[in-house]
Amino acid sequence: MLDLLAAHGAPHILIVLGLGVDAALLEACANSVRIYNSIDAPALRVPEAVSARFDIILTGAQWQSDIVQARHPGMATAILPIGPEFASEQQFEPLGLEKDYDLIYVAAAQFYKRHDLLLDALAACPRDVRALCLFGYGELADAIRAEAATRGLAVDCVGPPGCGYAAVNRLMNRAKFGVVCGRDDGAPAILTEYMLAGLPVLANAELVCGQQYILGETGRIAAPPDFADAIVAMRADHGSFSPRAAVLARWTWPHSVEKLKLLIYTARTAKIRPT
């Protein structure tokens, strides 16, 4: 990467997602506007010597912004997680398909996504509740399949590997609502992706980032002990929500670019020194 910068120059804007960056790279981009987005639940996943070199840090919740300010007083922050805040209305959309599944869970087959919460809730639901799990990647897919079969649950699983966006959109359109079961998770992009496909969302009330996207018109939150009842309720009244309209009014990328543009302009202006 340093060789690339030496050959072609630093970018105007450098965006770092999660891990995989060090101080040397950031120093080589000292005149760039350097933006960090943690993606996952920890507010800062890099050492202090690295995070201090950013100009803007995007977070997924106020508590993350508070942690950033405690480490780096005066650092520019914004609750503007790249996933759900930069959704595209063309990528996911309603297709008018038959709803042959009650719910869909699009998530990596990894523990932090908490498929155990979903399976426990389904075990307490009427046996005719049908669920679809779509895994892009993850090491637990076979274990989740096996547990669902052992418990006699009506759960179909797809992947890994995952499928293209058009296929994901079609699969989501076959469900009445989407679920997010994770707790120690960043603000998942799937929150607004479900909604753009026309699906209201049932989210874990313990989700540490992203609850701001669950409004009266977009879905419900439920504590783990209440998840089964919430699934039954969502199945009954999924058509009463208007999730796509809510996203189009608030969170598609043109809205977020306007917010980010001001932050970038301010950071860029601060770097300009009089000659």
Image (cartoon, rainbow, N blue to C red):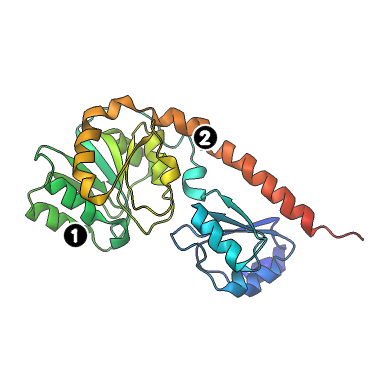
Quadrant in which the C terminus is drawn:
bottom right
- Residue placed at 51% from the left, 50% from the top? 81
Q: What is the distance, in whole Å, between disc 2 and disc 1 at their CAs?
A: 38 Å
- Residue placed at 64% from the left, 39% from the top? 258
Q: Relative to residue 153, is residue 40 depicted above or below?
A: below
Q: Secondary structure at mark 1?
A: helix
For label 1, the residue is 142
Q: Is residue 103 left or right of residue 8?
A: left
Q: As shown in the figure, which amino acid type bears the numbered disc 2?
A: Arg
Front position in the image: 132 or 6: 132
Q: Which mark is first along the chain, 1 or 2?
A: 1
Q: Quadrant of residue 138?
A: bottom left
Front position in the image: 14 or 240: 240
Q: Is residue 51 left or right of residue 210?
A: right
Q: Relative to residue 271, is residue 118 depicted above or below?
A: above
Estimate how packed mark 1 is, as few (under 14), some (14 to 19) or many (20 or more) residues with alpha carbons within 10 Å: some
For label 2, the residue is 250
Q: Where does the image place residue 27, in percent across and percent down from the top left?
A: 69, 71
Q: Where does the image place residue 157, in percent across and percent down from the top left?
A: 21, 49
Q: Secondary structure at mark 2?
A: helix
